[in-house]
Image: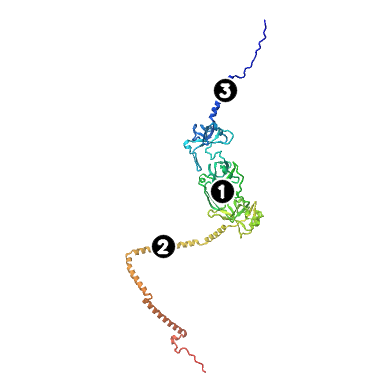
Amino acid sequence: MVSLPPARAIVKRSRPWNAVWLIPLVTLLLAGWLVWQHYRSQGVLAHIRFETAANIESGSTEVRCRSVRIGVVQSVQLSADLLSVVVDIRIDPDAGALLRKGTRLWVVRPQFSAASVSGLGTLIKGSYIELDPGEGPETVTHFDGLEAAPVTKSSVPGLRLTLTADRAESLNAGSPIYYNGFEVGKVELRTFDVATRRTRLSIFISEAYAPLVNESTCFWNTGGIDVSAGAEGFRLRTPSVQAMLAGGISFGIPPGTAPGAPAQDGAEFSLFANEAATRELIFRGSRLCLLMFDRSVRGLQKGAPVEFRGIPMGRVTDISLKYAPPGDKRVPVLIEMDPGLLRTTTEGGKDDTAVLSNAVKSGLRARLSTGSLLTGALFIDLDYVPEAPPAELGHNGEYDLLPTHSSGLVQLEAKVNDLLTKLTALPLEDMMNQFGRTAEGITRTAQEAETTLAEARKLLANQKTQGLTAQIDTTLGEIRASVTSLGPAGSVQGDLRRTLDELRAALRAFKTLSTSVAEKPNSLIFGRDSTGDPVPKARKK
């Protein structure tokens, strides 16, 4: 029997794959591609939170960007905290890149304000959600929607700044910003900072006018009518009609201020109440001086001007008793001024202290003067007073102490007080009593005159009195005849002349008689001597 060798199994490795497996693989890839295409065709799902869902309807409200439809509202539902609504929107695949950080969304509705009117087209076509794409690189799908449309789109080039103010009641989003009366921007947002208790305004300046803003620029409120009263009198400023209705902001560089570096995006500035406030801030006196007044400073306010013969030299910075030296009962007024304006041509090399000291020795004094009789506002008037007593520049701590002088108003008050004292010393009560008695007499006389007139009216109304008219005419005729006879051609006049001639002759005779009696008193008894005066005889030869 032939023995065979043992059989050995030959193990062959199977083929790693078979063409049959291509079918399910291709099917899987095709299914994945179809799923991806379906998912991609659905677009990007985003969620927006609004306070209310007014004018928003699922399936019909569109999402637009620059008036181009890019999506639709898919659903609207309440938030988990029930304090807002969540709107789910589906954005078209080719517009999904617009959903990034910084993107803003809001509902476009009809809006009416003093600054503008917008959204009128939605009255016919219905409201829609507007998308303003941001500039962030990150994709975002959750947003907090805006309740009002922004004033400017984020894609509009320009300068965005922040203004802070204590009060800004007349300003709102959309208020215009002016430069020399020309509109160059708008207020985008108004908020209130609780920490600083100041109003914050986000403003936008168009790119073409951005170079006008630099670090020395000041902004002030021009909204509403500005009525002020001070040492210069009443001041009334009226803006344009648009600024009066919607508020407004103006800006510029104060006179005498050098322009600074260009303002950077996001810089913060202060908003002043008016243009005058910017000039007060810019002024910086090189010297703080203290004035002590022994009269009331009612009518003098912070910011009141300090002038030298009408030339502005500074302003009042504070009025407080804390600056008074111990034991001094006068009212201290702190001012800041520029003594360099007092420098003469011979004092070119002297410092401000020497200039001010020489001016005080020469009679420079500070006094309160009335700037406006209507408002009663006061200002500080610096002038040289020749009759002022000698004085020198003093010091009170870190402040120079300028001597003061009584103003003309104080002297006028003294004269008025003297006049009132004299008037008080007059016997006004007796004069008034006498005047009262005189008035009573006049009243009685008037009453008697009225009674007499009444009786005269009764007399004239009597028929008997009316019958006397003819008799009165006859009597008047006789009086005229008598007057005529008394004239130069009348008989009475001739008789009077003859009588006067006889009187003259009698007077001459009486004069002769009186002369004789004076020469010989016994002539009345013995008569006159007929021999007459003795005739002197001639001398015998």
Instruction: Using the numbered discs, state the Cα–Cα distance from disc 3 to disc 1 in whole angstroms.
Output: 78 Å
Return the mark for residue 164: none
Tell which of 105 and 393 is nearer to you. 105
Circles 2, 3 touching at the beta carbon (< 8 Å): no
Image height check: is 107 above or below 385?
above
Indicate the quadrant where residue 8 lies: top right
Circle 3 is placed at which residue position? 26
Image height check: is 477 above or below 532?
above
Crowd around label 2: few <14 · some 14–19 · many ≥20 (10 Å): few
For label 1, the SS is helix
Circle 1 is placed at which residue position? 275
Circle 2 is placed at which residue position? 446
Q: Nearer the viewer, mark 3 or mark 1?
A: 3
Sequence-wise, the earlier of marks 2 and 1 is 1
Q: Nearer the viewer, mark 2 or mark 3?
A: 3
The answer to whether one can see residue 33 in this image is: yes
